Amino acid sequence: MIDTKTFLSVVSVIFWGGFFLAAMGKSRRSATTSLWLALLGSGLSATLGGIIWLRVLPLPKPIVSPNLWVGLGQGFKTVSISPLQMEFQLDALSAFFVFLVSAFSTIVAIYSFGALNAPHYERYRSRIVAAFNLFIWSTLLVIFSHDVFSLLLSLEISSLVLAYLALYKHMFYQSQPNHDASHQEQKRARIAPQVYLALGHVSAVFLLIALLILAIENKGMSYNDLYKQQLSPFVPTLVFLLALAGLGIRAGLTPAHIWPPLVHPSAPVTLHTLFTGVGIKVAIYLMYRFFFQFLEPQPMWGYLLLGLAVLTALVNVWYAISSHDLKTALAYHSIENIGIICVGIGVGLIFWKAAPAIAFLGLIASLYHVLNHAFFKGLLFLATGAIDNLTHQIMEMDKLGGLLKRYGFTSAMFLIGSVAIAGFPPFNGFMSEWLTLQALLSGVTAESTSLFGLAILLLSMVFLTASFALTAFCFYKMVGIAFLGLPRSPKETIDEWESHDVPWSMKSMMMLLAIGCLALGLTPFLMLQALEKALEPIGVDFSALHLASANGVDIAIPFGASSNHLPVLGSLGLVLILLAFPLLIGTRLRALKPDSAWNGGTKFQEPPTHQFSGAAASFLLHDTFAIPVLNKRLHQIPEYLPAHIEVSPSVDSPGRVEIFSTLYNFLFHNTLRMSRSFGEWTQNRDIRRYLWYIFVVNLVTLLIFILVKITEK
Amino acid sequence: MNDTLLSILQGILLTIAAPALTGWIAWFKAGVQGRHRSWTYIFQPYLNLATIFRTPATHPQTASWIFAATPWVLFASYTWLIFIVPVFCEPLLAVDFIVVIYALGFGHFVISLSGWDAGSAFGNMGGSRVMFFHFLTEIGLILFFAALTLRWRAINLKEIFDQHAQILIGLSNNIQEFPDNFGLVFLAFSLALIIMFESKRLPMDNPDTHLELTMTYKAILLEFSGRDLALIEWAEMVKTMFLFSMFSNLFLPIHRLAQGMAMPVFIGELLILSCLLVLWELRQARTRIQQVSRFAWVTLVFSLISIILTITFKAI
């Protein structure tokens, strides 16, 4: 019998031990031992999470701390407020997320044994490992917490740890005076922790207000008091909007999508993987809790979330195409996938009452995508991290090129990840995108959908498909520039790169994730049965889903009674694997006559500059769809946030403007301008004005005094 | 078991017949343009394929294994599609259209990647254009199929095909039903434009060009030779066959009603459709590549009109 108390104390001791060991020890051996501790802790929690999620064992007992008010003094006892108790508990939903976070941390920990040996981590290894321990611990704490107070506390801790990790690149630039980073890159590294702290606290304020309103309405701080209570009118909508703002900033929904591309690439690659794979998923977990457990879902909220989510997907994939740095592009893709996940949640909100089967389909699609995204994006990041180590931190696509022939294994892993994220069968990205589209289509045909709803659903379906197609485009571009063709750097630079591929501790973890991508894609029927269990706490009754054709449309769930999709997908996968790969080996074995590439009749000389650049590849898209910035003055605003995207550094192009960052800059600029002019007006160093202030203050004080005296009588 | 064998036989037959369809289109187009050929010209693609198949394939020194794998993966992902259309018996596979869209997209992705592989700029030029077309056709297809789903409340292609065969029976009994199905006319136009995108026909791409700079799709194929080239070209022909048979199953499903005579009727439908395509092509010039997206907007608008008509008739 597992007890939450025992478990949490053991895990906390392990992670804090790892933290102190690495932070105090500073030596290489203490960092390695600390990494072993992180591995042990996350392995333990992954086991626990998996066991509880899949119902092998019953739910563990919660821990409830004594009333914290009592410790604060006698005076608090007389005030009639509810007791302040910290409570930690697991249910199936949080167990799923515990499993996700800690299984992923386990993989990253094993990968780090090899990855952190790179020379550029030499000075920071201990700090990175220390923060790694603390990051896992605080993320687990957020998921474990079962009351308002401990949730807010643990969210704050995890924000602070993340902000510390985002300092890494800036510290690196500071310590290396002769680095060759551009001014723009240095600025991005410098402002990343600031932006994260600012946005993290704005989000915390929104969440604090939302949670306090809920706590006051329900007269209790524990989640158990908050679940599905009757609230006063307008309160649910207010709480929803506040929670959407807070969690939307944390997840990076569109107006707030500026932070992950800034912050994530500033962290070391191993931790970048963790942030993207599981860090921003914590906000998704809280969305399930808030929208479906604390509140009663309403269709209008769903339409709002759906619109935001689709906008997020489209905007971020667009900027991913424009960015020319592997890590930045992948960070944009992470938020795009958050958009796809939120589409599922939006469908769940819209149809919660009207058509439960469709709502459950949307919810399960979103949860499936949470899992899938962790797998394929983790794979992509681990491969990117390997390349980061191999090329000594060159991440610009236009400086890489031809890596598939040089580092075969790592590049093949990146290729698998990109096929999966672009959503092509038989890999896992396809499965959840397919389910999401099916949820939208079922919504379109549902009887209860109004004309307004129909329009929104159709529009979001088209936009979502557009973002899927653009993802395929982006990965065509990324894989093509960085991994295929000829090297794009001068020969002297390439000679400095590592000559051998990464060690096996890194290779094996990439391979594990790649196999996972394929396995999750080929076994949707098993995965959906498992994910059902995770969704049970939020009140999903899956019997409606199994009946399938509830609303006219034959929902093609791979385990549904009426569909024969499983053999089809199986056969598709088999056709692709059985036909393509043995024959592929045959092709390779067959003596192909080597010849030079066709260059329009002239001899192909292999000058790297003859190749297509990224800007050229995306030229047609930009030429057709880029929105010109109408207001020329927007270009002249000082860039508090970096807003110019260099589409191609080599071509003399004007560059493009990131509209949302520009809007933030506009906002900052005008706020500063107005506050400055207000300050100059009120404090103009003129003695007469200050005398006036004194006179007015005296007058007001007198008046108040007189008024008080009058009312007393 | 017998049915399964028959379905497999049907797929294989369509795969083998695919070059003849391309040959027929080329022969008819030449004839209409005044270049009269013997009727055996229809079977010229078979000869071409056989000749290329026998020549040894070359491999650019700069290319990787992606280049070698592309023809096989492409052929697999397109040939698989041919097993979902019914002609003279039920198809082997019943899938929903999202899978079809993604299978088509996988082909685009793979062939475009191989365009990067050799390192010369022509392949990339073609690849980026193909991926751009992929973006345009994918949104066109999703809205097209959404219109069908809204109409029939089915997302499985097999059910949609059956529904369309049913309407034909309804219409032949009672022409009064026509206004209800008027939206389908717009959908037919929408799909026709998408088919022109996908099979690289004239306003979007010139299939007969020999100048690298004007090529869209063919620019990627410049590096391929021998068996690899033959396989890719065959895969393209199979894709054209699939698109044509999907069109005829949706908007001209007479062969579903002709018991025993399905195959000849189906061939007749293909001939009619390809004649219409050739007549349309005769009056077209190649559009500038920056302006191709306007055809995608037209497909979207046609699908949208059909959706509006469906909703209106449902409301009445």
Image: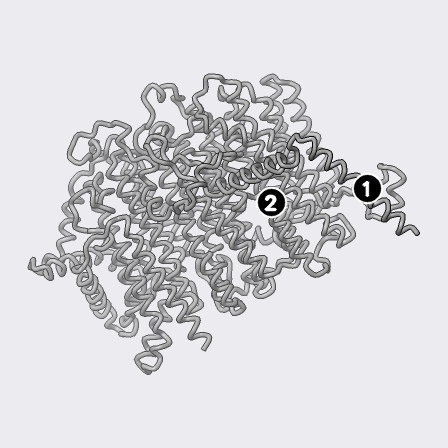
Q: Distance between the residues labelled 2 and 1?
A: 49 Å
Mark toward the viewer: 2 or 1 = 1
Q: Where is residue B126 in the image (x, y as percent from the top left)?
A: 26, 43
Task: Relative to A492, say whether A61 is above or below.
Answer: below
Q: What element carries label 2?
A: helix
Q: Give a yes or no on whether discs 2 and 1 share a subunit.
A: yes
B55 and A440: which is toward the camera: A440
B89, B288: nearer the viewer: B288
Upstream in the sequence, badge 2 or badge 1? 2
Quadrant assignment for the N terminus of chain A: top right
Residue drawn where x is 37% and y is 76% of the image: B180
- Give above or below for A582 relative to A309: above
For disc 2, the marked residue is A283
Q: Residue at coordinates 66% horizontally, 59% vertically from top-left?
A: A296
Which labelled disc corresponds to residue B197?
Answer: none
Label 1: how many Cα within 10 Å (few below 14, some 14–19, many 20+): few
Task: Give the number of callouts.
Answer: 2
Is residue B316 visible from the viewing direction of this image? yes
Q: How crowded is mark 2: few (under 14 residues within 10 Å), some or many (20 or more)?
A: many
Q: Is residue A70 left or right of residue A538?
A: right
Amino acid type at image mark 2 = Ala
